[in-house]
Image (cartoon, rainbow, N blue to C red):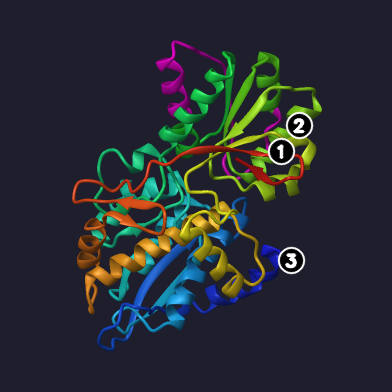
Amino acid sequence: MKTIASILPVLRRAIASSALLLGLAGPFGGSQAAEISIAQVAPLSGVLASTGQQMVLGGKIYFAWVNDNGGIHGARIKHIVHDDAYKVDETVRLTREVLADPDVVALFGYAGTANVAKLLADGVLDAGGAPLVAPYTGGEALRTPFNPHIFHVRAGYMDETEHMVHQVATLGMTRIAVMYQNDAFGKAGLAGVEAAVAKRQMRLVETATYERNTDQVQEAVKKIHAADPQAIIMISVNRSTAAFASQYRTVGGGAQLYNISVVDPAELVKLAGIKAVHGLGISQVVPFPFGANKPVVREYQALLRKYGGGQAPSYTSFEEFLGAKVLVEGLRRAGPSPTRAKLVKGLESMNNFDLGGTSIQYSPNNRIGSRFVEVTVIGGAGKLLR
C-alpha cells in the first residue's frame, strides 16, 4: 500500500503549476463551456501536512470521476491548490490572491478555525462573495453569528464535545481535564467542553495548553497528570495529540483519552505507537468510511481505488469527498454559467439533499449541513472500532 508521502510529489507538482485540471461531468449534461475555477488553500506542509494531503485527495477523486464522465453543463473544473502550511497569514494572503481572479467561483476545503476566522474578521469572504464549501473545522465562531458564505458539511465542536462529555458522564467519570491548542481552534473546543460540563453540574479538574504549530506538550502533561483526572479531552491536532498521549502514558497516566474529529488515527499510531493510543476515543462527524453500509461510502471506496494512487480510506478524505459532492451539486444548480452569487443560491437550495445515505440540510437561513456525531475508538490492532 502506498503512503501519503508517495503521492506528495504529485500534489506538489500540481501546486507548482497552480492548478489541477480535473474535468467534471456525468449525468449533468448541457452546453459546452470553458472552465469552472475553484480554489483550495490547505496545509500541505507543517504540522497538519498529512491532514491537508488527505483533504486534497478527498476532493480530487470525486472531481476526477465527474471529469471522466463529461462535465457540469459541459464545463471542466480547474482545481487550484495552494499550501498555507496551517499559517493564518498565509491563508489570508493566498485567499485574497485567488479571489482577485474573477474566474474563481468557489473556495473549497480549508483547514483551521483561526485561519477561517481571520478571513471573516478581515472581511475577505464578504468582499469576495465566493462561497467556502466544506471547511475542515467545527469552530462555533464560524457558525454564530450566521455568515452566508460558509457552507459547513460537518457538525461543530460544540456538538462533538457535548457528545464526548455525555459519554464520559454515562461511564460514571466525574474528573475531566482538557488539553487544548492555544488558539481559536483550541478555545472553541474548550468552550464546548465547559458548556457540556456545566450542563451536568460538573467541573473541570484541570486545563492546559500547548502552542499552535508545535508539539511541545511537556508542561501540559505535567499539569494534567498532577490533577489525576479520569478522562482527558484533547482539542489538538495529530502531532501534539500523539506527543501528549505518548508522554502521558510514559509518566504513568491512566485516564481515558479522547480527541475531536480533526485527528487521523493512522497518523496517531504511526507517531505515538499503538501502546500510547490504544483505546483513545475520537469523535467523528461523518459516517464510518471503512464499511460498506451506505451507498456514498461504497462510491467513495470505489473512486479511491480508481483515482487515489493506492491510498487507504480515511475520515478526512471521506469528509472532503462529501464536500466535493456538495460543491458539484451546487454548481449544477447554479446553471451553465455559474457565478459566485448563483453558486450561493444553488447551495442554499439544497434542503435535505441525499448524498447517498447521508443528507445535507441548507436553506437561505442555515449553513450547518449536518450535526451527525459518533465516537470511535482506536483498537488493539490500530484500527478504528465503532
Of 322 and 136, nearer the camera is 322
Q: Residue under label 3, please give it.
A: 1
* Amino acid type at mark 2: Gln
Q: Is residue 66 above or below residue 182?
A: below
| Three-letter code for the amino acid on which mark 1 is drawn | Ala
Disc 2 element: helix
Quadrant for residue 78, please give it. Answer: bottom left
Q: Residue 297: image x %, image y %?
A: 51, 58
At x 65%, y 40%, the residue is: 240
Q: Nearer the viewer, residue 48 or 167?
A: 167
Residue 134 at x, y = what percent? 40, 55
Label 1 crowd (10 A; few <14 / some 14-19 / many >=20): some
Residue 342, above or below 201: below
Q: Which residue is mark 1?
A: 243
Above or below: residue 128 compared with residue 366: below
Question: Dot 3: what SS?
Answer: loop
Q: From the viewer's perspective, is the residue at label 1 or at label 3 nearer?
A: 3
Q: Which span of residues is magenta-colored?
A: 190-218
Evaluate if marks 1 and 2 touch, with contact meaning CB atoms under 8 Å apart.
yes
What separation in Å lies between label 3 and label 2 (alpha carbons)?
30 Å
Q: Is residue 150 magenta?
A: no
Judging from the image, what secondary structure is the residue with disc 1 in?
Answer: helix
* Closer to us: 361 or 223: 361
